[in-house]
Amino acid sequence: MVTNLDDFIPYQLSTASNAVSDLIAREYKSRFGLKIPEWRVMAVLGNRGNATQRQLVEATLMDKVTVNRAVKTLVDRALLGRSPNSADGRSHHLMLSDTGRDLYDQIMPAAETMEKKIMSVLSDGEQKQLSAFLGKIKQSADDIASG
């Protein structure tokens, strides 16, 4: 039984994630006019090149409604383009527009700077360990969820 919530690792993961997300949200909103879900969509597309909304839901672990709203906002701002999905006529391939790619290219250095600031409390070795541990935890959660 957990006697101290601050020692409960799922709680620690959640609060650390929220603290980092809130910090990033303030930065991206003030500098780039983006909310976190919009940035996550742009980050996936910037990394992958294109994706369907279903693939974005899987990649970001955000719900369909949140991804849909983010995509709509980004399309309305001309930051994303759409092309028909020949494999599934009900969906589209989404990709960064030229304007979206330019914004992504501006954000990435800011994201890397923020990561360095946040992670500066850890040595390079500790950062690698943390990344490995988080990967193992996510894999364990995925395995448990899939039965």
Image (cartoon, rainbow, N blue to C red):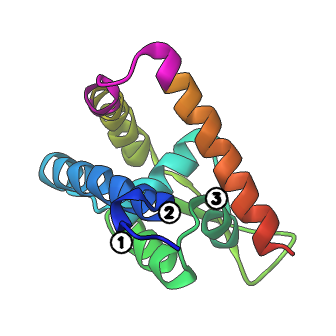
SS category of the residue bearing label 1 = helix
Residue 134 visible in the current orientation: yes
Residue 78 visible in the current orientation: no
Q: Residue at x 36, y 66 (%)?
A: 4
**Neighbourhood count class around disc 2 (C-alpha, 10 Å): few under 14, some 14–19, many 20 upward:** few
Q: What residue is pinned by disc 1? A: 73
**Neighbourhood count class around disc 1 (C-alpha, 10 Å): few under 14, some 14–19, many 20 upward:** some
Q: What residue is pinned by disc 3? A: 59
Q: Which one is nearer the viewer's eye here, 71 or 7?
A: 7
SS category of the residue bearing label 2 = helix
Q: In the displayed orientation, state which residue is furthest to the left.
A: 30
Q: Residue at x 81, y 63 (%)?
A: 143
Identity of the amino acid at label 1?
A: Thr
On the image, the x and y values in percent for residue 6 come to: 34, 60
In the displayed structure, would residue 33 be above or below residue 72? above
Identity of the amino acid at label 2?
A: Pro
